[in-house]
Structure formats: structure tokens, C-alpha cells
Amino acid sequence: MNTIGNDESYNKKPDNEISDNEKSNNGNTADDYKDGAVTKNALQVITIIGEIEGHDNLPATSKATKYEHMLPKLAEIEMDKDIKGVLFIMNTVGGDVSAGLALAEMIASMKKPTVSLIIGDSHSIGVPLAVSTDYSFIVPTATMIIHPVRMNGTLIGVQQTYDYFERISDRITSFIATHSNVSKERVEKMMVDTTQLSKDLGTVLVGRQAVEEGLICEVGGISDALAKLDSLIDEQ
């Protein structure tokens, strides 16, 4: 299955060239897996994996979710009357703040029911992405890491630089607090914890800890996420 962010073009097979294995995969044909998403029974499944790529391209050896591919895909889903709900499966180490927030805002503004499921990691800018949906799940062994904003490149040691960092941080913490059950003050406190990470500031939350903090709604897996998405669709 291609993932969003994969530069390889997708060539649709004629029906007579689709293998029996492809046809027997829960009724899906090869075309159901186009663009890194699965569409089945009016539900769309999208993966957000690897690193969130921004305006700079990552090395070819890095697994990445390209936000310039995701944005039009989400717009297409929102306009498609046949798609009733979207499940986002998350396993990301974070990445570009601007790109990640753009995706999070896009997901949060969708009228169609959305559910997120963290199956591995949802670190850094992956936290706003995970809470941007209508409902969220995390498997017991998955982790979330909340840490301060980092910046690459030349930095000027003046007050304006620190003010800029603070504004970026405020954008992130405000979004998280707005779309979850944790306060902005608590998110800020978790960002600067000095006791958990050996080479950085921040907080690691594993499975149920993310639920107890109010970031994620529930501990669960794929069947729980799909069942919740069905119920949200029925409520519309």
C-alpha cells in the first residue's frame, strides 16, 4: 500500500489484471489503496507516518508524510459525498511545525466525522495532529512526547528571537488545549519537565497516561476506532 508522501506514481490496473489476492483482501481491489489511503464502505483510512515534511524536502531515505499531498487529499475527501468518515492512523516522530499545524487545522475544520488512532508514536507536532479529530484512541504501548519548540539554522540572540519562539509555542499549546481535555497551563508544564528525557526537556506519555492527562479520549485499537467512527456517522 502506497503511503501519502510516496513519490511513486500509482498506475491503476484494469479489472482483468487484478490478482485474486488483491480481490480477496476484504473485497478491496488495488484501486482501493490509491494515494496511501483505504476507502471501504464509505470510510476513508489515512496514515500519518514518519516525519511531517514541510517546505524543505527530507532525504530520500527518510519516511515522510508530505503535507502538500495531504492537504488536497483532505479537501477531496471533504467534498466527496460518498465518503462518510475518516480514520487517521498515526505513527509519527513529528516534524515541521508549520506543516503539522496546517494539517491539524485542516483536519479539525472537517465536517465529516474523524477519529485518530495512535499505534506507535505521536511525538512533537504529532500531538496536535492526534487531538485534531472528533475522537481519539491510543494503543497501550504507543507513546506521545511533548517538548519545547526546536529550531534549526542561524539564531540571533535577541529578545525578538525569544518572543518568536514563545508565539510558536503558544500556537501549539493553544491548539492542543482547544481540541483536548487538558489545560494550556498543563501542556506548558509538561513541555518543560526536566526529569523524563535525558537529552531534552519534555514529557513522555505511554498509552493510558495520555488518556489520564486528557490528551486522548480512550485506550483502544483498530476495531474500537472503526466502531466509534461508525457511531459518529450514525449520529449525523
Image: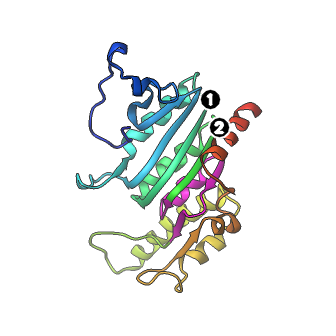
**For residue 218, side relative to residue 207 (left or right):** right
Within-10-Å neighbours for mark 2: few <14, some 14–19, many 20+: many
- Label 1 sits on what residue type? Lys
Please tell me which residue is depicted at 48% across the width and 64% down the height of the picture. Answer: 123
**For residue 230, side relative to residue 109 (left or right):** right
Q: Of the residues under marks 2 and 1, which one precedes in the sequence?
A: 1
- Mark 2 touching mark 1, by CB under 8 A? yes
Please tell me which residue is depicted at 53% across the width and 65% down the height of the picture. Answer: 143
Please tell me which residue is depicted at 48% across the width and 47% down the height of the picture. Answer: 103
- Label 2 sits on what residue type? Pro
Where is 29 relative to 115, above or below? above
Position in image of residue 7 (x %, y %): 27, 39
List the residue tagged with mark 1: 84
Q: Classify mark 2: helix, strand or loop.
A: loop
Please tell me which residue is depicted at 62% across the width and 29% down the height of the picture. Answer: 84
**For residue 100, side relative to residue 183 (left or right):** left
Name of the residue lying farthest toward the right: 235
Position in image of residue 171 (x %, y %): 54, 61
**For residue 113, side relative to residue 153 (left or right):** right
List the residue tagged with mark 2: 113
Position in image of residue 195 (x %, y %): 54, 86
Q: Classify mark 1: helix, strand or loop.
A: loop
Measure the alpha-carbon separation of dots 2 and 1.
Answer: 7 Å
- Comparing 27 with 104, the one in front is 27
Number of callouts: 2
Q: Which residues are magenta?
A: 121-146
Q: Residue 68, can we see it?
A: yes
Position in image of residue 116 (x %, y %): 58, 48
In the picture, the quarter occupied by the C terminus is top right
